[in-house]
Image (cartoon, rainbow, N blue to C red):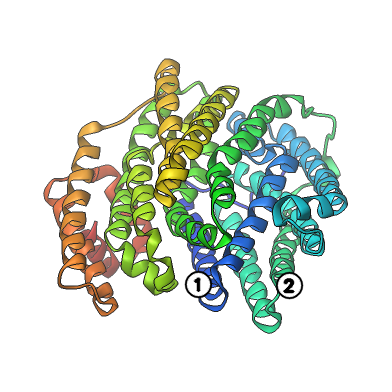
Amino acid sequence: MVISILKVERQSAIAGSVYQYASTFTFFISGLIFYIFLAKTFPTSIVGEMSLLIAIVTIFNIVFSLGLQQGAQHFISYYLGRGDYEAVHSLIMKMIVIGLIFAAIGSAVTFVIAPYISILFFHTSSDYLVVRYLAIELFFLVCFSIFNGIILGLQGFRFSAIISIFGQSFSYFISFILLYMTHSITYAILGLALGYGGSVFVFLMGMIFFLDFSKRRAERITLRPVFEYSFPLLLSSIIGYGSSYIDRFVVAYFFRTAELGIYSFVLLISSSLAILAGPINNILLPKFSELYSNGQRADIKDATAVSSSVLSYLYTPAALGVAALAPQILELFADDQYLPGTGPLMILLFITAVFVTQNVLTQSVSSVRATRFFIIVTISTLISNVTLSFTLIPSMGLSGAALANSSVSVTSFLLLFAYSRKLGIFGIDATRLGKIWLSAAVMFGVIYYLQMSIMSSLIFLPLLIVLGGVIYIGLSKLLKAFPLEVRGQIIEVFSFGSSRMKKVLNLVI
């Protein structure tokens, strides 16, 4: 066999989700602590500046990674499904080289144009050194994205998660220490770069160790099909990034950086719930792609229905619970000056909860190589966000920005819903989703009433969280919302062979 595929072993979707959730949870906690420190130590204008720098490096990462993370996941899993290990080996070798080349190009471009970025976004040329530090972070971030895509394509979910946990926690830890010592955002960026650099090194060493170089056939496969698959994803990612961020730039245009800081923190809390969707996304594309390689579209449809139910079961109560406790959460993680973000936060959470299954639809459409459709999706979301941003933000302020931002989820879901039905891969259990939403809505009503009336103090926050969880779990079990087959699988995986843990999970799931 040309590649010793996995000592980074291929794991099942359920087993892999354990590791991916651990990785995402670590990233969430590390980032949350970092931004809480930032919000409590610096004025809102500094929070806005940091969010702007992260926005810049993120868009550059999208551009220079060329959509190859998704391409690696799809094609490597596709060839694994066919048992063509020589093609897998050749593809990995070439993608490592391409990743390093484009990371270097992106870093060089960022370094050169740093003064112009500083003038454009910070209205001064004196901040260009901060942007040049972004060039260092960008190099490692591009490599990290592509190399992680390779590992996920190999379905080495555990290996990916372990390295991601190390890199993400180390990034924020070093950034936190440097920021605390220097009170300079420049060193905060450098800290993030160091963490990703360590992850890239371990990823690279891991892939070199797992590949059998003595028997490689470097010309076995070309990258042209990968680029044809990835290029529409690249364009859609760039446009989609603009569609997701245009409301922030409009807020910055119409209001002070202080308002941008409040809105950015609101978006941080709202987007942090991606902890529940991200691991599922990482697992579904490789698994759906493997099904596609064997012509199993009906299985993709069934898997889409189950995955949508699982994601909704996890995400909906979390989003509605945070919405019910929005004032207390903003006060806890920041301070009173962020309370104007309560309404926008609730808007974002409710709308994303309704349309969260777009995450599953995105992976199912990607798995059948219908990636060109994402260009249509992202152009449509960009138009909706731009139109609503300039229409609503001047008159409604941050609430208008939240509505404009939420239109991205709505537009994306509606288009993916129609197209996946056309492709014959759309699956959903409306009855199950209805029971999930009924349980979550009742929980929201009770917790929101208690929080607004007799339990508004922060000391009641832990009690309200526990009470919300009890109400939701109790109602969902009473309505039998959770699918028995998935329930059994999750209990089996998360119990780790412990009969006592199985009893606990039986009570809460």
- Percent across and percent down for residue 14 are 42, 49
Q: Residue at x 24, y 56 (%)?
A: 509
Residue 297 figure quarter: top left
- Percent across and percent down for residue 23 are 53, 60
In this view, which residue lies farthest toward the top?
422
Is 270 situated left or right of 200 in this image? left
Element type where label 2 sits in the image: helix
Q: Amino acid at mark 2?
A: Tyr
Judging depth in this view, the residue of 217 and 442 nearest the camera is 442
Judging depth in this view, the residue of 404 and 329 nearest the camera is 404
Q: Which mark is residue 424?
A: none
Element type where label 1 sits in the image: helix
Q: Residue at x 32, y 59 (%)?
A: 322
Mark 1: give few (<14), some (14-19) or many (20+) Cα within 10 Å: some
Label 1 sits on residue: 36
Is residue 256 placed above or below 406 in the rendered structure? below
Whether label 2 touches label 1, CB < 8 Å: no
Is residue 153 placed above or below 112 in the rendered structure? above
Q: Disc 2 or 1, which lies upstream in sequence?
A: 1
Q: Residue at x 69, y 84 (%)?
A: 181
Label 2 sits on residue: 187
Q: CA distance from mark 2 to mark 1?
A: 17 Å
In this view, which residue lies farthest toward the bottom?
181
Residue 147 visible in this rendered orientation of the protein: yes
Q: Residue at x 59, y 48 (%)?
A: 253
Mark 2: give few (<14), some (14-19) or many (20+) Cα within 10 Å: many
Judging depth in this view, the residue of 165 and 92 nearest the camera is 165
- Percent across and percent down for residue 206 are 72, 57
